[in-house]
Image (cartoon, coloured by chain):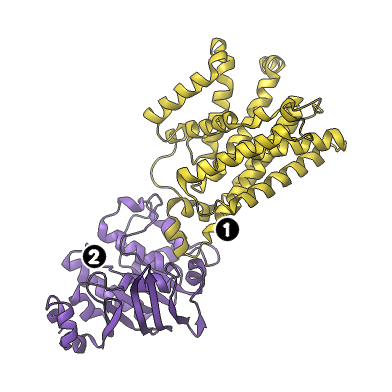
Amino acid sequence: MSALVDFYARHSRLVDQIGINAILALSLSVSLQAGQLALAQAAFMGIAAYVSAILAMNAHWPLLATMVAAVAAATLVAALLAFPVRRLRGIFLAIATVGFGEIVRVFANNLSITGGAEGISGIPNDATTPVIYGSLALVVVVLVLLARTKFALAVTLVREDEYAARGVGIDVGAIRTASLALGGAIAGLGGALYAHAAFFIAPTDFGFGRMEEILVWCVIGGVTSPLGAVLGAALLSVLPEVIRFLADYREITDGIILLAVILFFPGGISSLWRRGAVRVRS
Amino acid sequence: MLALHDVGVRYGGVDALQSVSLEVEPGRVLGLIGPNGAGKTTLVNATTGLAPLASGTIDLNGARIDGLPPHRIARAGIARTYQNIRLFGALDVRGNLAAGWYARPGRPGAADVRALLDRAGIGEIDLDARASTLPYGDQRRLEIARALAAAPSIVMLDEPAAGMNPSETVRLVGTIRAIAAGGIGVLLIEHDMSLVRAACDSVVVLNFGIVIARGTPASVARDPVVVEAYLGSGAEALA
């Protein structure tokens, strides 16, 4: 026990970072499970981070209120984004959503309310470890409860075969919109926590590099496995800390690990425990 | 009852269907035959909302369904199978039946699963088997079971015997007749004329998107226009 306390005392920032990264990985996992390679999670995260930071600093809202507003804003933007991209699939959807992410970053870089390229500093540092892990637990509980609903069945069927999914009565557009909005909500939660744990945010925190990082966590964990996404995020967050000399070469080591997983473990970490047919829960 | 009135479908400048009218009645099997490219699958796609109508109307039990999106037409009571099997391949047998059951309340229980598989003629199948690993004939029948899981009033079977051996095809006749005997209207697209003759109450023949004959399997087989469309191949098997 004392070893754990000692570890936390020395690595509390890393522990918090793992919790936030796990939430961000889950947010992308939700879209991927519906077969949507929608890469706007960093943008949803950024919108929420700015909303919560601005409300906390300019309007002096308490943490919980800023988090609720931030999640609502990210959810709304994600749901609205679902409309123009509704006919896009695969790589075309990926490119369009990456483009959307860049638009958000450019806006954040040029608006005065977001502090432009210098960002916002002095954000109340009130996203404590219990707040972060309480939020992660909430996301996990919501996803576990959802896994037993017809929504989860529809998400699986849309991923497997959209055409046949329509034939069994599934409104594919509504399911895609809902999964994108849910992913946006979770990314928004991660973004609000990020702002309140980081003290300082800038547009570069929410650019393509961040999006790529979240995607790598999910690929390493296994693209359709929420638990795999969490493990992927935890593993790649811890690795540079455990092997200190790698910290400066983070992008390179992430790339090597990604290539190794794609070549030798195409199903990611989750393929170690997921075998056989996809089961539908009853 | 499913009723198509003067249905037309255009793909670009090509008339895939022109002024096609037909009725699929509860408890009866209507065969839809014709050479490749005659418009048979287009007719199923138009009915299920996947191909927009250029003209005409489609009613299901007195209510217009043309113009509705595919998922609402499915929920209205039309289930189908596909010429190229479209099972949810990564899911097991139970998962595919749960998929077919999607628009109904709850999930299929063990007894429902057993009953559906029995009706499709695969009562002994391994429920945990991944759908894509099943033998071809079983996949065709699982697709039928998935369609029945929706408790439809109309089932459209698009070449269900394709890839089946002769003895499997003979068994399929019993399966199709039993589905109709349960009060469901069946539209059967098929190239296997012996199956059409054995399973269908009546037949509509399409060629170049136009109905060129209709009647009982025997009367259609004697129709010189049909014989010419098929160049004799298969038409005599109907007689």
* Residue in the picture at 69% in, 35% down: A191
Label 2, on which residue? B162
Q: Is residue B205 above or below residue A142?
A: below
Quadrant assignment, res A240? top right
Residue A275 drawn at (x, y percent): 40, 40
Q: Nearer the viewer, mark 1 or mark 2?
A: 1
What's the CA distance linking mark 1 and mark 2? 34 Å
| Residue A134 makes an appearance in the image | no
Amino acid at circle 2: Ala
Mark number, residue A174? 1
Q: Is residue B196 above or below residue A172?
A: below
Query: Which chain is depicted purple?
Result: B
Secondary structure beneath label 1: helix
> Chain ID for label 2?
B
| Residue B74 makes an appearance in the image | yes
Question: Relative to the observer, which residue lies in front, A79 or A202?
Answer: A202
Question: Relative to the observer, which residue lies in front, B235 or B146?
Answer: B235
The residue at the far top in this view is A245
> Chain ID for label 1?
A
Please identify the quadrant where the N terminus of chain A is shown.
Answer: top right
Q: Is residue A100 left or right of residue A218?
A: right
Q: Are marks 1 and 2 in one subunit?
A: no
Q: For chain A, give the colour.
A: yellow
* Residue in the picture at 56% in, 42% down: A97
